Amino acid sequence: MTEFDIGEKLKLWRRSNGIKQDVMAAALGVSQATVSRWENGLDLPSIEISRRITDLIAKQIRDELAIESRFIEKLSSVQAIFDIDGIRLQATSLGCTRAWPLFSKLVGRAFEPRMVGESRIVIDDSVSREAIIKGDIAMIVGVSTRHLDLEVDSPFRHRWISRFWFHGHRVFTTLAYEPCDADTPIGIEQIFRLEDISKR
């Protein structure tokens, strides 16, 4: 994090994890007013405090991602987790390993340059990508035969549901895949914005 965005990212991380300013202040050894000034861009934490904030956020992201990855790995349904930054594969389910065994061995690889079809359309649309990163888009549903130009596994027509979520300032997606009829039209079926979901 840079000194210019640390306050905003601290606020986003703190709120998304349900941590109050006074608790954050106590953990860092500063006053609540100091945390408030950082988050409102009125002051900057020292280099040492900035490192402690970055380490705190990074540790929680690693811990939570490890838990989420272990959870996904045990599922018989076809699911995968990607970090939106570079579209890096984080984990695959048991069902994904059965459906796409070679793809599932590519955990840790970034796939953004190799994306095709509906996934490519979403990533290349700057408005959609910005809305995902800001948290305005919560889910996308589509139908595809493949997502990558890799010839590692056999393509098949399937419906996919991409749910976007935050860990700190990083955005991840959990993709769930399910079979669909062979004549189901390929394309993006629905985009769910956060305000639409929260109204229900």
Image: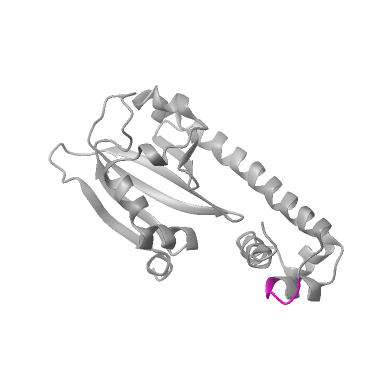
Residue 106 higher or lower than 192, as above or below: above
Magenta stretch: helix, strand or loop mostly: loop
The answer to which quarter of the image holds residue 24 is bottom right
Q: Which residue shows up at 32% across the image and 46% down it?
A: 120
For the N terminus, the image quarter is bottom right
Q: Position of residue 130 (x, y in %)?
A: 43, 61
Q: Which residues are magenta?
A: 39-43
Residue 160 vs residue 125, the one in the foreground: 125
Q: How many marks?
A: 0
Residue 51 higher or lower than 156, as above or below: below
Q: Position of residue 101 (x, y in %)?
A: 39, 22
Residue 148 vs residue 178, the one in the foreground: 148
The scheme the figure's colours follow is one colour
Q: Which residue shows up at 31% across the image and 25% down it?
A: 151
Q: Which residue shows up at 37% across the image and 51% down it?
A: 123
Q: Which residue shows up at 16% across the image and 43% down it?
A: 184
The answer to which quarter of the image holds residue 10 is bottom right
For the C terminus, the image quarter is bottom left
Residue 95 shown left or right of residue 170 in the figure = left
Residue 71 shown left or right of residue 54 in the figure = left
Q: Position of residue 26 (x, y in %)?
A: 84, 64
Residue 171 shown left or right of residue 178 in the figure = right
Residue 115 higher or lower than 74, as above or below: below
Residue situated furthest left in the rendering: 183
Q: Position of residue 144 (x, y in %)?
A: 25, 41
Residue 145 shown left or right of residue 48 in the figure = left
**Is-magenta flag for residue 162?**
no
